[in-house]
Image: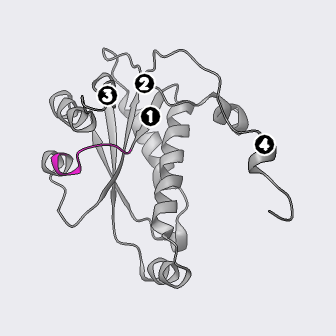
Amino acid sequence: MENFLSLALQRQSDRAFDSSRPVEQEKIERILEAARMSPSACNAQPWHFIIVDEPELKNKVADATSTRILGLNHFTKQAPVHIIIVEEKVNFTSGFGGWVKDKSFALVDFGIAAAHICLAAEDEGLGSCILGWFDEDKMRKLLNIPSSKKILLDIIIGYSIQKDRPKKRKEAGKVISYNNY
């Protein structure tokens, strides 16, 4: 395993994948174990992960993520795996704490799980991209997700063929301060 900072610096949102190269099941299982073990508020674990890797269904899911009008997500069919994150109910403690503090702890939990998925994929030599833009109703029908559930993210995984690119981030001094704002 690499050192964590190197892994974080290397990871990028990939938008080009080798569609002819499937992802090994054992790699997907390790990625999912990293997600399953990610921390959550009051150990609520408010998620359900749906792995879509059957080619025909995967292509239909990819169609639900793209739009010609806005030119978004036209690359998603290249990725051999989609990991759909569905919201589950939080436990009482997390829900009550979120209500009292006026914070959605579950949304934080999903972000942490998504980061674990992407970093675990990178550690496995795979690329990833987090998608928030998709037709939720179409996705719900394709994957038999109950109407009472919210679909939060689709993370695509595969062998990237995209060149590494430099990260564009705000300077540290603009986003970090010590002891006061």
Amino acid tagged 2: Arg
Amino acid tagged 1: Cys
Between 112 and 176, the one lying in front of the other is: 176
Name the element at disc 4. Answer: helix
Whole-Å distance between the Cαs marked 1 and 3?
A: 16 Å
Where residue 68 sits, quadrant-wise, is: top left
Amino acid tagged 4: Ala
Between 103 and 142, the one lying in front of the other is: 103
Q: Position of residue 158 (x, y in %)?
A: 40, 26
- Check residue 15 in the rendering and tell me which mark sits there, or answer none: 2
The residue where tag 3 is placed is 71
- Check residue 129 in the rendering and tell me which mark sits there, or answer none: 1
Left or right of 58: which side holds 75?
Answer: right
Magenta span: 132-138
Q: Position of residue 88 (x, y in %)?
A: 33, 66
Whole-Å distance between the Cαs marked 2 and 1?
A: 7 Å
Mark before the other along the chain sequence, 4 or 1: 1
Left or right of 134: which side holds 103?
Answer: right
Q: Is residue 61 above or below residue 102?
A: above
Circle 2 packing at 10 Å, graded few (<14), some (14-19), many (20+), is many
Amino acid tagged 3: Gly
Q: Can residue 1 be seen by looking at this rendering? A: no
Name the element at disc 3. Answer: loop
Label pair 4/3, CB-CB below 8 angstroms: no
- Check residue 172 in the rendering and tell me which mark sits there, or answer none: 4
Circle 3 packing at 10 Å, graded few (<14), some (14-19), many (20+), is few
Quarter placement of the C terminus = bottom right
- Single out the mark in the foreground, 2 or 4: 4
Left or right of 105: which side holds 83?
Answer: left
Q: Is residue 12 above or below residue 170?
A: above
Label pair 2/1, CB-CB below 8 angstroms: yes
